[in-house]
Amino acid sequence: MKGKLVVCATPIGNLGDMSQRAISTLTEAHVIACEDTRRTRKLLTHFGIQPRELLVYNDANERRQHGKLLDRIRQGATVVLVSDAGMPGLSDPGYRLVAACGEEGFEVTVVPGPNAAISALAISGLPPARFVFEGFLPRKSAERRRRIEELKDDERTLVLYEAPHRVAATLDDLAEILGPRPAAVARELTKMHEEVLRGTLEELAKSARELAPRGEIVLVIEGTRQGRAEVEPAELASRARALMDGGVDRKDALSQVARESGMPRRAVFEALLDDR
């Protein structure tokens, strides 16, 4: 008997999104490899599935379990890979297991289903034809800002995951480096408190600072616009100074000029410094 690996999507929140094929696949599996047995067991119990073997496979134990899973497939087992939610392999070590199975010549099949990144892109109202999934940005501010700098000239719509306690800081960095681009914050997709906020990065950053969003969060950001005419630094400085001379706070003046010109707020700030 030949073994195989099945990459199986599970709901991202609403259990009603579980497909009949996913239920059958998990029921027939010899081994279910999951990130967290508590989360997966809750899912299995809801659908009355009694797993033959439930094995943890995540970032912490990947090296130890990797060989064990390959051995089980060599022995003829059907191993089903799931994540805590959505499609395995996007923000977990699953893709390395898939690659190893390919090298070994094992059969690898997929049971498609819900995915937070694609779902958020679909309802963001931003261009979906060409996009890039960046996953989670670095946690440390300096590393995060460097990565955003590397992404700022990408014309594709950008899709990110972010933790609720970091989303305000991340949006602040995105707004400063990318400028007043249209964006969306999608949270708790398919769940009771599903919400999508749309606006410029600066507006969304302000909202996140005032009322920290909770739950699972996806950020969708418009790519850089082709052919956008850049405003000269002297013109940026002149506009900002005119607003400040009229009594507008410097911070608000920088934001207004950035929004009207389509230039990053930081570019306006630097133009002011150079214009002294």
Image (spheres, rainbow, N blue to C red):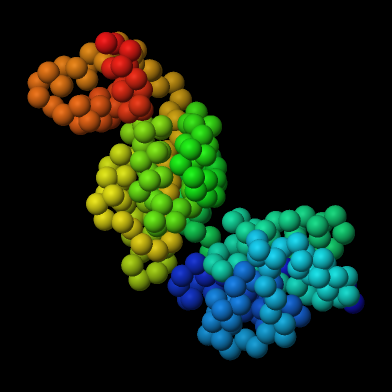
Compared across the picture, whether 95 is left or right of 135 comes to right
Horizontal side, residue 67 vs residue 235: left or right:
right
Question: In the image as oriented, which residue stretches furthest toward the left?
Answer: 247
Picture quadrant where residue 127 is located:
top left
Give me the residue at 38% from left, 17% from top.
Answer: 230
The residue that appears at 16% across and 29% down in the rendered structure is 249
On screen, residue 47 above or below 6: below
> Where residue 176 sits: x, y (%)?
36, 33
- Tell me, yes or no, if residue 8 can be seen here: no
Which residue is at 28% across, 17% downward?
272
Quarter of the image for residue 96 reads: bottom right
Question: From what the image shows, is residue 237 above or below residue 260?
Answer: above
* Whole-percent x, y for residue 90 in the image: 61, 55
Q: Nearer the viewer, residue 100 or 189?
A: 100
- Percent x, y of residue 124: 39, 49
Quarter residue 225 falls in? top left
The quadrant of the picture occupied by the C terminus is top left
Residue 164 visible in the snapshot? yes
The image position of residue 19, as x and y in percent, is 57, 74
Report the side of 275 relative to 112 (left or right).
left
Give 270 or 154, whichever is nearer the viewer. Answer: 270
Q: In which quarter of the image is the N terminus?
A: bottom right
Total numbered circles: 0
Point 46% across, 70% down: residue:
13
Name the side, left or right, on which 185 lies relative to 39.
left
